[in-house]
Image (cartoon, grey):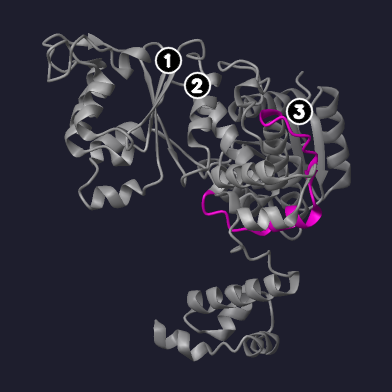
Amino acid sequence: MNNSQRILVVDDDPGVLRLLSIRLKSRGYDVATAESGEEALSNVGGFRPHLVITDLRMDGMDGLTLFQHLRRQHPSMPVIILTAHGSIPDAVEATRNGVFGFVTKPFEAPSLLQQVESALRLSGAVEGEAGEDDGRWREHIITRSAEMEEVLQRAWMVAASEASVFIHGESGTGKELLARAVHNASKRADGPFVAVNCGAIPENLLESELFGHKKGAFTGASSDHEGLFQSANGGTLFLDEIGDMPLSLQVKLLRVLQEQQIRPVGSTKAVPTDVRIISATHRDLEDEMNAGRFREDLYYRLNVVSLSLPRLSERREDIPVLANHFLTHLGEKYEKPLKGFAPEAMERMVGAPWPGNVRQLYNVVEQAAILSTMPIISEDLIKKALRDDTPGLPAFADARRDFERDYLVKLLQITQGNVSQAARLAKRNRTEFYKLLNRHDLNPALFKEAN
């Protein structure tokens, strides 16, 4: 049994928790427990379970509410519901809404363990068609972010298929790294991985780059040229910035994907091709389709499975580990004895906005490494590399005040200024809720007028 298979068990009955924990640990699973849905949600980020087993009926947050929260935050994490016989109709309805399965109490160990194994195989935590996850496929992606781990879990699962993958993310978030990781985890890992930036090649040359050309096909074609589709045969072709591809070429790409063969420029003979397509862009392709700049049929051909990379500002816990990793690499590259960052330098990096994402972080660390005359990178060097335009993280009190105001505004928008209804949603009495509104100078009447 793989000790990395993590299961979170949730039940407000300590006896059931203890029994389940013993049964699962005896099979080699890594088990964490929680006595409420609220406690479970607070534990998910740190424990990062591959599977959650939860009781249906619990005081406070029940199992279905917990499932709904988990589905929003971790959509590929399977959930098994424990239920008494009288609640089976509710559990059946839950499976229609996406719960992996349910087990009735008192449960039979073989039935429970069979469901657990099936659910773990779904989550990619058990050796199956994709093979055992030893981590090597993603070794160049450094993260401690729960959100990034969720993306990587989905990437591992989709890698076992031949489905086309579409990666969305801002520039500098690591789209090519993720595409290469999917390739490494797939059955095509021994084949070539070929990447092309569709926005970096002039339109009149892109067709030849992708599909190849015959000698004499155009001025300057002095010999036959093998295109990237042929170079990637048996492997993966990564089409970066697919949103920049001209419409005329989108038609030809769609035909290639449908017919699984290419026709080099100037040739009358089609050539079979066997490639998996992974595409990416920083553009919103739905907006591009609405504007007539991207073909809808091509979009759905490419976007069989979608992976979305978070911005660096959404995974700030990764900044220290990435910065130190980059510094170690750059110390070796420039043969300098670089040891780390001054605390103030790291604080400034953690609080920076990072519009250029991970690529910008690397450039900032590289500039500081080049200019540093000391083993420890100073705050002043980081400040200059960031061009001194980086506000720090807000103080806790300021962040809490901003969150509270935004929360109240959202409640008033939802209820169209109905204070009684908003107070009930916030689980506060009207008097207390009015005090909160006054504290933030919010007038419910304005929200009635706005709606």
Q: Is residue 342 magenta?
A: yes
Q: Callout 1: helix, strand or loop?
A: loop
Q: Is residue 124 above or below residue 444?
A: above
Q: Which residues are magenta?
A: 332-356
Q: Mark 3 belongs to which amino acid?
A: Glu
Q: Residues within 10 Å of mark 1 (few under 14, many from 20)?
A: many
Quarter of the image holding residue 225? Answer: top left
Q: Nearer the viewer, residue 95 or 411?
A: 411
The alpha-carbon separation of the residues under discs 1 and 3 comes to: 45 Å
The alpha-carbon separation of the residues under discs 1 and 2 comes to: 8 Å
Q: Earlier in the sequence, mark 3 or mark 2?
A: 3
- Which residue appears at 46% of the width and 45% of the height? 171
Quarter of the image holding residue 250? Answer: top left
Q: Quick check: marks 3 and 2 in contact, CB under 8 Å?
A: no
User: Can you identify the residue that label 2 sits on?
Assistant: 183
Q: Callout 3: helix, strand or loop?
A: loop
Q: Nearer the viewer, residue 320 or 221?
A: 221
Q: Quick check: marks 1 and 2 in contact, CB under 8 Å?
A: yes
Foreground mark, 3 or 2, reads 2
User: Can you identify the residue that label 1 sits on?
Assistant: 235
Q: Mark 1 belongs to which amino acid?
A: Gly
State left or right for residue 426 relative to residue 360.
right
- Which residue appears at 81% of the width and 34% of the height? 31
Quarter of the image holding residue 26? Answer: top right
Could you tell me residue 446's position as x and y percent?
A: 46, 88
User: Can you identify the residue that label 3 sits on?
Assistant: 108
Q: Earlier in the sequence, mark 1 or mark 2?
A: 2
